[in-house]
Image (cartoon, rainbow, N blue to C red):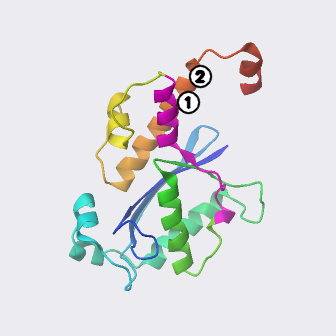
Amino acid sequence: MKILFIDLETTGTEPGKHGVVQTAGIIEIDGKVVEEFEFKSRPFPEEVCELQALQTIGKTKEEIASYPEPHLAYQGLIRIFDQYIDRHNKADKFYMVGQNPSFDYNFLTKFFQKNGNQFLYAYIQYYLIDLIAAAALFQSAGKIKVPNMRLETMADYFGIKLKAHDAAEDVRATRELYHAYVNLIRQINMPEKLKASAQ
């Protein structure tokens, strides 16, 4: 199983209007980490930088303006993705995992499009693994008890160290949280028939 843990820091919340300034990820294949990456990129000239978004990630317009051109981050991502995925094979794709991964997927899709590539979906399964939805399921089943499903809250609950609002830190915590959930599932008492099918 090929898993892509990925987190983006952006200059706002609208993929068509705002830009990506940091992209960090971990690629795990059959339970083993095979790649960690991080790219910083300045926004495209037409993209808007919202003050609140910059305050959240602790950066200034001057700082992100000094980052490399966005096409360099794009080329780095393509080089890594092509190393692990045959984009011409419909059965060979990453399972993308994240906290509200549709946010990152939508921004990444637009980032690819702005770099002239319409085919991010060639690398990633169309169904995303959302750890917020997983946390809500565990909460409703009485397996955990937390005030909210934010990454900081869940990391604290499971004893995972986290420096929030940095993509590299967030993605490492996300991977640890994913495995905490997997272990929690394994502890659930399932009928023998389901246990056998899961092995």
Residue 24 x/y as whole percent: 43, 57
Report the magenta residues as a range. 121-141
Query: Does the magenta run of residues contain 58?
Result: no
Judging by the rendered image, the residue that carries numbered circle 2 is: 186
How dense is the environment of label 1, judged by Cα within 10 Å: few (below 14), some, or many (20 and up)?
A: few
Tag 2, which secondary structure? helix
Residue 175 x/y as whole percent: 48, 41
The C terminus sits in image quarter: top right
Residue 138 x/y as whole percent: 50, 28
Residue type highlighted by circle 1? Val
Tag 1, which secondary structure? helix
Query: Does the magenta run of residues contain 136?
Result: yes
Q: Name the quadrant containing residue 17.
A: bottom left
Most distant residue in the bottom direction: 45
Q: Is residue 66 visible?
A: no
User: In the depicted view, which residue is nearer to us: 63 or 120?
Assistant: 120
**Residue visible at 66% across and 17% down in the picture:** 190
Judging by the rendered image, the residue that carries numbered circle 1 is: 182
Residue type highlighted by circle 2? Arg
Q: Name the quadrant containing residue 149.
A: top left
Determine whether label 1 and label 2 are within 8 Å by CB. yes
